[in-house]
Amino acid sequence: MNYPAASRKRRIVALLIDSSFYGYLASLFMYLVFFVFKAPWDTTVIHNGLGFISVLWLLGFIIFSAKDSFNGLGLGKLIMGIRVYGEDRKPASILSSLIRNLPLLAWPIEALVMIISSSKKRVGDHLVETQVCRDKNI
């Protein structure tokens, strides 16, 4: 199984698909909480709850970071026909997926490294020794 490295364009489009999908899910969640279930806007948890908002943000980021943990695929990668492989040429694990997506917090640096890198790897890929490859079996 010697798949070629995925193009930068496919990787960027896959990330945009994932970001749009998770943004839509977050919007849907907020709509359900505040408009369908009629949660009050003026509670002390919301006004004084920087900790509450931070916990929600952290939970959302952890879920987003695990986006490629199902057999090396996320929704964007599935649509674009690419997959994350570990150094053992097996699809990336949940832990490696979480770690490789943490540097996305500094996405401009990630994008610059991927553009400059001859191996088309991001900082996260270098951290856990993964490679995003084109998979024609998808």
Image (cartoon, helix red, strand yellow):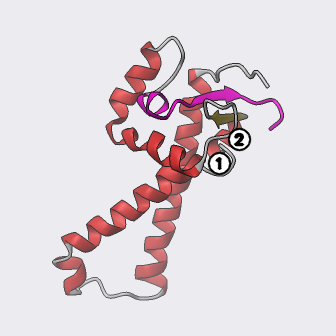
Stretch in magenta: 123-138
Residue located beneath label 2 in the image: 79
- Please report the residue visible at 16 percent of the width from the left and 78 percent of the height from the top: 48
Q: Residue furthest front?
A: 88
80, 51: nearer the viewer: 51
Query: Which quadrant would residue 132 be assigned to in this image?
Result: top right
73, 36: nearer the viewer: 73
Taking 107 as reference, is 69 above or below it? below
Left or right: residue 50 versus residue 30 is left
- Please report the residue visible at 61 percent of the width from the left and 34 percent of the height from the top: 86
70, 106: nearer the viewer: 70
Give the residue type at disc 1: Leu
Q: Position of residue 98 (x, y in %)?
A: 48, 48
Residue located beneath label 1 in the image: 75
Q: Residue furthest top?
A: 118
Q: Position of residue 32 (x, y in %)?
A: 49, 78
- Please report the residue visible at 66 percent of the width from the left and 51 percent of the height from the top: 70
Q: Residue furthest right?
A: 137
The reply to whether dot 2 and dot 1 touch (C-beta < 8 Å) is yes
